[in-house]
Image: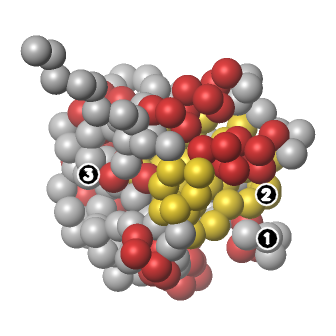
Amino acid sequence: MEKAKKEKPKSWPVMESFYTIQGEGYYSGRAAYFIRFGGCDVGCVWCDVKDSWDKEKHPEVHLDTLISAVEATPTNFVVLTGGEPAMYDLTTLVDELKKQGKEIAIETSGCYPLIGNVDWYCFSPKKFKAPDEEAYDLADELKVVIFNKSDFEWAETHAERVNQGCELFLQPEWSKQEQFLPEIIEYVKKNPKWRISQQTHKFMNIP
């Protein structure tokens, strides 16, 4: 007798969801609906959404509620972020969003195998937990946060492993912007395969 297939989840712990402008990386400046998942075990010391870490603090939100919220906006671009969104099976959410004609990006540390066919994989590796090998193959965008001088060399170790078409970004950690942005500028001038990402949403004072 065949085992019954495990039903795909139709709800997830969500810290918040909102319509805004993507502030970072390749799609900076693009209107986007953000779904921020609760739950993360990576533990970045400089994380600006530490309230997202404990998934038990955040209510389960049903697929239909999320789809309706996205559909109430004019955007065709949805960003799955966290927390760590790849902790979850995202199949039903991604599939339904695609049925609605949406383009889906994920922002992930790459620590978990991706379950869901997203259109754009933003890989932001962290020193606190090693990424899964598939992240290097899936990455459309490598975004490395510069928090210490050693992070430039560390960024290069990841750039060597991502696929050839991956876009490369260096982003100053917000609290060290004044210290590291001049260094990033000079680094990118010497190493033009990289581009600069900034948290422009913070300059614009939007979520």
Decide: marks 1, 3 in contact (CB < 8 A)? no
Please, what is the three-letter code of the amino acid marked with disc 1? Answer: Ile
Outermost left residue: 1
Residue underneath mark 1: 206
Q: Which sits earlier in the primary sequence, circle 1 or circle 3?
A: 3
Looking at the image, residue 111 sits to the left or right of residue 109; the answer is left
Q: Nearer the viewer, residue 115 or 207?
A: 115
Determine crowd level at label 2: few under 14, some 14-19, many 20+ residues with C-alpha closer than 10 A. Answer: some
Does 18 appear above or below 97? below
Q: Which sits earlier in the primary sequence, circle 1 or circle 2?
A: 2
Question: Between marks 2 and 3, how big is the CA–CA gap?
Answer: 26 Å
Q: Residue at x 35, y 67 (%)?
A: 40
Looking at the image, residue 111 sits to the left or right of residue 58; the answer is left
Does 203 appear above or below 98? below
Residue underneath mark 2: 20
Outermost front residue: 1
Q: Residue at x 35, y 82 (%)?
A: 45
Looking at the image, residue 86 sits to the left or right of residue 71; the answer is left
Q: Residue 109: x, y in percent?
A: 35, 54
Q: Residue 20: x, y in percent?
A: 79, 57
Q: Residue at x 59, y 51 (%)?
A: 62
Q: Which sits earlier in the primary sequence, circle 2 or circle 3?
A: 2
Residue underneath mark 3: 111
